[in-house]
Image (spheres, grey):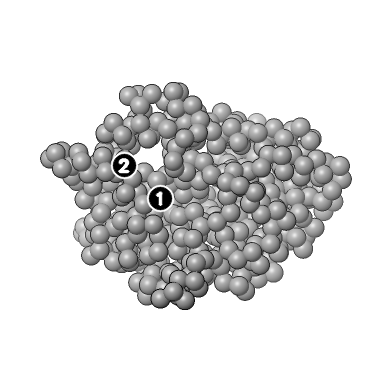
Amino acid sequence: MCIRITPILILAAALLPTQTVAEKPNLVFIIADDCTFRDISCYGGQAKTPNIDRLALQGIRFTRCFQAAPMCSPTRHNIYTGLYPVKSGAWPNHTRAYPHVKSIVHYLRSLGYRVTQTGKTHINPRTVFPFENFGGGKNPDMKYIDRLFAETAKGGKPFCLFACSNEPHSPWNKGDASAYPPAKVKLPPYLVDTPRMRSDFSNYLAEITYYDSQVGEIVGLLEKHGLSKNTLVMVVSEQGSAFPFGKWTCYDHGLQSAMIVRWPGQVMAGSETDAMVEYVDVTPTFIDVAGGKPIAPLDGRSFLPVLRGKADTHKDFVYGIMTTRGIINGTDAFAIRSVRDTRYKLILNLNHESKFTNACTKMPLFRSMVAKAETGDPLAKRLVRAYHHRPAVELFDMEADPLEMNNLAGRAGTRKTEARLRQELATWMRSQGDQGVATEMKALERQARGKARKKNR
């Protein structure tokens, strides 16, 4: 089953207090930047993350959390609006939402919350996202968070805080890399083993640990001000890292996320769930937790029943969209769409004739893969080609092949599965107004600099 807890915890669940209107909980959402979920310690990774691991022991760990787009800007719009990327208008990178879109600020502010954000923003326009505080640097401002918590502790309004880290986004130059000697680093099988790859992976792991220290500092400030008991803390890893086959792709290395939720008295400590949730569900969940209802139709759905142990499933399908048009070193058009259920993942590469490129393919670590391929190394040649050139259809058995190394598309035994997922993906795209390649070609119009770019043509 999806929720795994001990018999003692099951008994304790019956004794959990119910929330009253007068005790609206505070909400803290902490997000990393370009962190592959599998690299976090409590997800089996090499990075030392004692603070995140501790939260997992105190709350619930989601094993199937996903976002809809493997890039920073659409991911954040996805979280704050409760809408999928095409519906909100924010599907390319460096993007903006349609002016009529409502965000979590509008929803929670009307429920009496201070809705605030600190650290990386990457969202537009401000009218859609009128956070009380906006940005303040690439990383969360701990002095601001300290003041916010102090004001609430003195009898102020409940808050919803989004603390947005810039770690472990490249360049990987924070944290103690000596804790991860390059020679001892374990590279995933979809990366080519080169000295540069090992060195960069070491630095990347160190920066995950640095992010973990930020999580610990924020949790410590909650404790300092006596707010821990009435605060829901949600920690996520964002899309995958900038290493090949992660960010900028619709493989699970790019779309799947860590999610840890601690909420004393409401969420069972030490529990785990396989329920499929998406970032688009965060806004409706927070509205539900705050005791409200969305004032506009949302794509996401509240997973509060999962948090409280009253449900062990949430969604049957999760979806992905990737747009290379308009990104740094991006292919002029390489539209990718995906859908997966609990077992199978379907990816459609709608511009598969094109060569897939992005910022990663200019990075020294990828160039080291190319250099090794040019020496005749068969694995390096295969992986470099697999990154640049995709088939029209990819299908993976996520139980047997979680790293998506064996494409099953077109095989006799999986044709019904492929057809079923194709139909599901087509239905979702229609519901979003997503026209595939035609939508890809409109990406420049949706970028924050789109208006200026149009004037300069």
Q: Nearer the viewer, residue 304 or 166?
A: 166
Q: Could you tell me how far apart the alpha carbons at marks 1 and 2 are, in whole angstroms?
A: 16 Å
Residue hosting label 1: 247
Q: Nearer the viewer, residue 124 or 273?
A: 124
User: Is 457 positioned to the left or the right of 88 in the image?
Assistant: left
Residue 364: mark in rendering: 2
User: In the rendered image of this protein, does residue 310 appear above or below residue 349?
Assistant: above
Residue at the extreme left: 376
Indicate the quadrant where residue 290 lies: bottom right
User: Is 412 positioned to the left or the right of 315 in the image?
Assistant: left
| Residue in the picture at 61% in, 37% down | 215
Q: Amino acid at mark 2?
A: Pro
Q: Amino acid at mark 1?
A: Lys
1 or 2: tag closer to the N-terminus: 1
Task: Name the spot of residue 333 as percent of width and height, x first.
Answer: 33, 66
| Residue in the picture at 64% in, 64% down | 126
How many numbered circles does the render carry?
A: 2
Mark 1, secondary structure of its residue: loop
User: Is 77 positioned to the left or the right of 339 in the image?
Assistant: right
